[in-house]
């Protein structure tokens, strides 16, 4: 895609302006490096398009593709030029929180992406003991209604099959409720009071979920209506 303009904005968009490219950069900057990890955060993107976009980013020097030692497949790492897009991505998210949130529909409530973000948000240093197991049950979906997060001091895993471990906390709610909580559109206290979420388990974990689960980096942003 070429715009035929000397404007640096146009030249930048020739590299990062194609559909999915900015979201691939988002995932890379959030720590995804394996192909399947990138696919988890971009579930509606076809593997063919992902391969094509990664090749383009590597060609333009934003991604370094490296063969995995002793394994099949490759890892993809953001270069310095890619990392310098972080404030741009953050500013785009800030704008989206203020001006585009009204367009959020049920089709946008990607449960897999939500659980991936929650996995990345767990503060293991705020949990107690060698292992903490959290069970989420969503009441508004027929498939993949149950998810588990298993957190140790060194690793956080998420799965939608029962890991067979003793659960420390049970959360029951709709997908939208948990999205609204994590994004800062709904307070945890109000959700409990209005019975939008049910929390069962040790009070140290259920009293305030955000003591050990970091909310979205956009959670504190006021909406456009609030600042206008």
Image (spheres, rainbow, N blue to C red):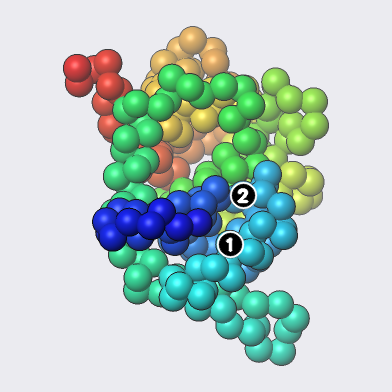
From what the image shows, is residue 156 above or below residue 179? below
Residue 29 placed where, x, y %?
43, 61
Residue most toward the left? 228
Residue at 40% x, 39% y: name it.
Answer: 215
Residue 68 seen from this side = yes
Out of 223 and 46, give the one closest to the viewer. 46
Marks 2 and 1, how far apart at CA: 12 Å
Indicate left or right for 7 with 214 as reference.
Answer: left
Residue at 65% x, 77% y: name it.
Answer: 74
Residue neighbourhood size for the residue with mark 1, other residues' Cα within 10 Å, grouped as few (<14), some (14–19), many (≥20): some
Out of 124 and 4, give the one closest to the viewer. 4
- Dot 2 or dot 1, earlier in sequence: 2
Picture disc at residue 200: none
Q: Quadrant of the C terminus?
A: top left
Residue at 48% x, 38% y: name it.
Answer: 205
Residue under numbered circle 2: 42
Q: Nearer the viewer, mark 2 or mark 1?
A: 1
Residue most toward the top? 194
The quarter holding residue 72 reads bottom right
Residue 114 placed where, x, y %?
57, 39
Circles 2 and 1, Cβ within 8 Å, touching? The answer is no
Indicate left or right for 104 with 222 as reference.
Answer: right
Q: Secondary structure at mark 2?
A: loop
Q: Secondary structure at mark 1?
A: helix
Residue 153 seen from this side = no
Residue neighbourhood size for the residue with mark 2, other residues' Cα within 10 Å, grouped as few (<14), some (14–19), many (≥20): some
From what the image shows, is residue 134 above or below residue 30? above
Indicate left or right for 89 with 176 as reference.
Answer: left
Residue at 54% x, 68% y: name it.
Answer: 56
Picture disc at residue 53: 1
Residue 131 placed where, x, y %?
59, 56
């Amino acid at each position: 895609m070429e715009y035929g303009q000397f404007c640096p904005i146009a030249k930048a968009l020739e590299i990062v302006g194609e559909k999915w490219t900015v979201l691939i950069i988002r995932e890379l900057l959030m720590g995804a490096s394996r192909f399947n990890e990138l696919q988890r955060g971009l579930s509606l993107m076809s593997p063919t398009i992902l391969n094509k976009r990664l090749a383009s980013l590597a060609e333009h020097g934003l991604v370094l593709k490296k063969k995995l030692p002793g394994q099949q497949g490759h890892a993809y790492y953001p270069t310095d030029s890619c990392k310098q897009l972080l404030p741009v991505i953050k500013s785009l998210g800030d704008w989206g929180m203020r001006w585009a949130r009204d367009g959020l529909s049920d089709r946008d409530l990607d449960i897999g992406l939500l659980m991936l973000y929650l996995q990345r948000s767990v503060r293991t240093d705020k949990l107690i003991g060698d292992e903490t197991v959290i069970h989420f049950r969503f009441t508004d979906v027929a498939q993949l209604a149950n998810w588990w997060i298993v957190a140790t001091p060194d690793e956080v895993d998420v799965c939608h099959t029962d890991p067979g471990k003793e659960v420390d906390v049970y959360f029951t709610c709709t997908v939208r409720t948990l999205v609204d909580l994590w994004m800062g559109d709904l307070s945890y206290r109000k959700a409990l009071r209005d019975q939008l979420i049910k929390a069962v388990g040790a009070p140290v974990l259920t009293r305030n979920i955000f003591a050990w689960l970091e909310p979205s980096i956009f959670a504190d942003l006021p909406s456009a209506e609030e600042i206008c």
